[in-house]
Image (cartoon, rainbow, N blue to C red):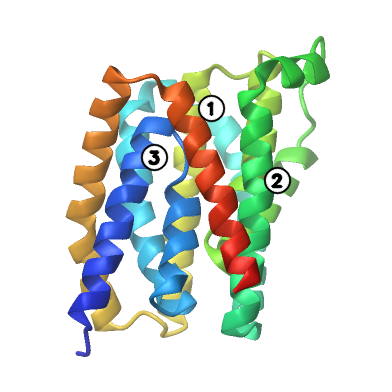
């Protein structure tokens, strides 16, 4: 067993702050976690640890909104996920460290743009207004496939689901609570699938599993603090601060 405890401490601190952001803003766990960890550890080990921690985090959040869960809406993107994830993991194994960092930077920028659009509800509501028809079965499957590819490649599956969920909510097809339940169930399934896949490939070592276990309390504490902060401050300003930091982080990764 070979663990660098300084790196483990930095990983726990990163997960802690990413969880606070997630608790306050409702997003940012993957963006912050996978955006910062490549600065002090290999992308490969960061993706594996984050996937294990994110599985627990998403299940925790899903449990709080489980009454709003709709299995039929959940299973459609999961069908695409089953195909997309192996493709993403294959891409991950073909890229070198620098290429993966560039990919993470690009996806962070794309995801941040979608988050900005999501905050500008008037823009989206105008775009999606009066679209009463429900997306056919192909669209959520394609979304799940895209998210699976991104999740398998760089452990940041958010952008396709953000866009899809925004359309469903703005069109009145999903409530916010329903979207949260489907998102957390889907992302939890995706991360669990990724963990099992890389485990079968032999990429999960005992050291990485122990590191992931050590970071779980940091994630749980960060989430609790984030939720408590959310109750006491204006999340609007905080959300924009997070968005600016995500853009800066993405640019640093690309330049580096």
Residue 104 placement, left or right of 189:
right
Position of residue 65 measured from the top left corner of the image (x, y, whole percent) = 37, 25
At 29% from the left and 34% from the top, the residue drawn is 226
Question: Mark 1 near mark 3, Cβ–Cβ under 8 Å?
Answer: no
- Label at residue 143: 2
Query: Mark 1 highlights which residue?
Result: 179
**Mark 2–mark 1 CB contact (< 8 Å):** no
Q: Between residues 201 and 167, which one lies in front from this camera angle?
A: 167
Residue denoted by label 3: 22
- The residues bearing labels 2 and 1 have C-alpha atoms spaced at a distance of 14 Å
Mark 1 → mark 3, Cα distance in angstroms: 16 Å
Q: Which mark is residue 103?
A: none
> In this rendering, which labeled residue sits more in front, label 2 or label 3?
3
Q: Taking the image as drawn, is residue 76 in sight?
A: no
The residues bearing labels 2 and 3 have C-alpha atoms spaced at a distance of 22 Å
- Screen quadrant of the C terminus: bottom right
**Lateral position of residue 49 relative to residue 140, left or right:** left
| Residue in the image at 55% along x and 16% along y | 175
* Residue 241, position as x, y percentages in the image: 48, 36
Residue 47 lies, in percent from the top left, at 45, 69
* Residues packed near mark 3 inside 10 Å, few (<14), some (14 to 19) or many (20 plus): many
């Amino acid at each position: 067993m070979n663990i660098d405890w300084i790196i483990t401490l930095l990983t726990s601190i990163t997960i802690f702050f990413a969880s606070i952001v997630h608790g306050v803003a409702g997003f940012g766990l993957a963006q912050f976690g996978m955006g910062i960890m490549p600065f002090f550890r290999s992308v490969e080990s960061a993706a594996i640890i984050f996937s294990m921690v994110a599985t627990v985090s998403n299940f925790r959040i899903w449990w709080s909104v489980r009454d709003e869960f709709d299995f039929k809406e959940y299973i459609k993107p999961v069908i695409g996920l089953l195909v997309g994830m192996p493709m993403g993991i294959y891409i991950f194994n073909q890229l070198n460290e620098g290429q993966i960092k560039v990919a993470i930077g690009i996806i962070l920028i794309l995801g941040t743009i979608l988050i900005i659009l999501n905050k500008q509800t008037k823009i989206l509501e105008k775009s999606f207004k009066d679209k009463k028809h429900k997306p056919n079965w192909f669209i959520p499957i394609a979304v799940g496939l895209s998210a699976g590819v991104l999740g398998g490649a760089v452990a940041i599956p958010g952008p396709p689901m953000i866009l899809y969920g925004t359309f469903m909510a703005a069109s009145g097809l999903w409530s916010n609570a329903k979207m949260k339940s489907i998102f957390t169930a889907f992302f939890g399934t995706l991360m669990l699938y990724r963990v099992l896949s890389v485990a079968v490939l032999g990429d999960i070592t005992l050291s990485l599993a122990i590191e992931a276990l050590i970071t779980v309390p940091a994630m749980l504490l960060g989430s609790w603090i984030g939720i408590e902060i959310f109750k006491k401050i204006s999340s609007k300003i905080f959300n924009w601060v997070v968005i600016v930091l995500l853009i800066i982080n993405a640019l640093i990764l690309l330049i580096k």
